[in-house]
Structures are given as structure tokens and as C-alpha cells.
Amino acid sequence: MVRFENVGMRYGAGPEVLRDVTFVLEAGSFTFLTGLSGAGKTTLLKLIYLAEPPSRGLITLFVLAGLGGLVIANLAMRNRAIYCPACRTPNLVAFVRSYRYKCNQCAAEYTRVGSAASAAFATYSATLDRPMPFYLYTPAFDDPSNPSSVTLSWGASAQLHQMPFAYDLDVNTVSTFDPSGAVVSQMGLTDTQATVTTLPAGHYFWRVTARVSADPDDDWQSDYQDQTVDIP
């Protein structure tokens, strides 16, 4: 669990980047952090994973330690204390940074918490350039004279930094989208729909992937890979 109580944060003598921030994140919850550039998202994450102390207020972290108790980290007025569930002795920031711990479990737990937080932040940073999630819509049969004609459509995606991106459409005979079952593959689409007129009778799976044009590895693929279409 993460709890912020009237937390403020400023760098040096500058203005407050965060002011009177109060919230609770329950254990196991899934939370999105959004905001304009410069709003303080990165600063907030740094406070959560202990990279920076707050200028004022209180931050409390309850982390399941696997050591028979809870690790509680209280950050207040630029002092940082981490309570070890084994020796119950707080290690202030000077001890933490110099690795002079009261016991081995202090060191192990601080390393574990720090590594997990750093990995989570790296994953978050890697997703910033990816297109936003979108939905696939129900296939439409708009041409009564051609039962093999179907229009596949999806919601528009977006990119945080307004980088150009395009959609890739795949239609396959198997839900795992094996290359051997590929029926349709259209790359670089800019519209949010495509009409396929040559599908033979059968049961098909389809998906759409949005890719940033400058870096195709920055992509978002809809989770609805079990979306199906039946051609009579």
C-alpha cells in the first residue's frame, strides 16, 4: 500500500512541483498516472520508489516483506526511515546510502524494494512512446451482393507526444496468428477501418496493431485477439 499525506515537493529553492498531494493506493490495485508534460508525474514516481524525499508531508509504504511482518517507510521533512521487521531499527538515509545496516535483512529488504521499484519505473518509461489502447468493433457486412465482403473497424489510437503512427491489420485462421494461417496482412493503414472482399467461407480471427512510424517496436496490440468473423 502507498499513502501520501499532504506531500509537497520542490527541487532546491524552486517552486513546488507537487503541492498538498494526498491519496492511497491499495495493495494489488492497478492505477493509471496521466497528466500534461511537466505536471509532476516523474517526480511523483520518484517519491514512491524512494529516489527522492519530499520537501514536506508524509509518505508511508507498507510492503509485504516475506520476513514475518511489514516494512514501513516513513518519509518526512527530508528524513527517510526504513524499519526492518527483524531488528525493528530505523535506518536513516545516511545509513541506507552507505549500506551500513543493522542486520543483513535490512540490506536484503532495501535492495529488494529498490530493485522492484526501479524495474517498474523502467517498464513505465518504456511504454510512454507507445500508442494508446483502442478497441476492435464488430465486423460489418455492408454489401448484400457479396457475402465475402466484410468491413473490419476499430477505435482510434493516440500517441502521447503526437508522433505519427499507423495500423497493421491481420486476419488468420488460428487464434495464435501463426504465419501459416495468415489470410490478410495489411500494413501501414492510416484509417480506422478496412474492407476485405476476398475472404472465402470460414471462421477467422483478426487483430490490429498500432505502431509508431519512427520505431515499429513501439507498438500497442489490442488484447481482443479472439475477435472473430464468420464468412458464410
Image (cartoon, rainbow, N blue to C red):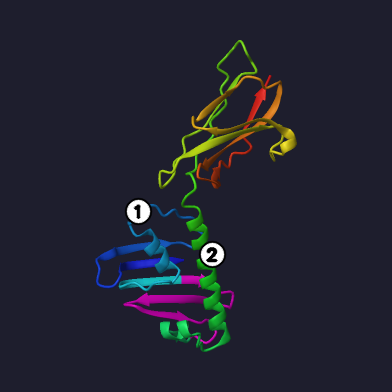
Mark 2 is surrounded, within 10 Å at the Cα level, by few (under 14), some (14 to 19) or many (20 or more) other residues, namely: few
> Residue 83: image x %, image y %?
47, 81
Left or right, 16 with reference to 61:
left
Mark 1 is surrounded, within 10 Å at the Cα level, by few (under 14), some (14 to 19) or many (20 or more) other residues, namely: few
Q: Is residue 108 above or below residue 28?
A: below
Q: Is residue 76 magenta?
A: yes
Q: Is residue 66 above or below residue 194?
A: below
> Residue 190: image x %, image y %?
49, 32
User: Looking at numbered disc 1 in the image, what kind of residue is underneath it?
Assistant: Ser
Residue nearest the observer in this picture, 74 or 41: 41
User: Looking at numbered disc 2 in the image, what kind of residue is underneath it?
Assistant: Ala
- Give the residue furthest to the right: 180
Left or right, 57 with reference to 68:
left
* Magenta residues (range): 62-88
Element type at mark 2: helix
Left or right, 147 with reference to 69:
right
Label 1 sits on residue? 37
- Give the residue furthest to the top: 145
Residue nearest the observer in this picture, 57 or 211: 211
Left or right, 77 with reference to 200:
left
Q: Is residue 149 above or below residue 219?
A: above
Question: Which label sits on residue 71?
Answer: none
Residue nearest the observer in this picture, 14 or 205: 14
Residue nearest the observer in this picture, 57 or 112: 112
Q: Is residue 160 magenta?
A: no
Mark 1 or 2: the one toward you: 1
First in residue order: circle 1 vs circle 2: 1
Task: Give the residue displayed 40% in from the left and 43% down from the top.
Answer: 162
Label 2 sits on residue? 119
Q: Identify the image quadrant of the C terminus.
A: top right
> Residue 27: image x %, image y %?
50, 63
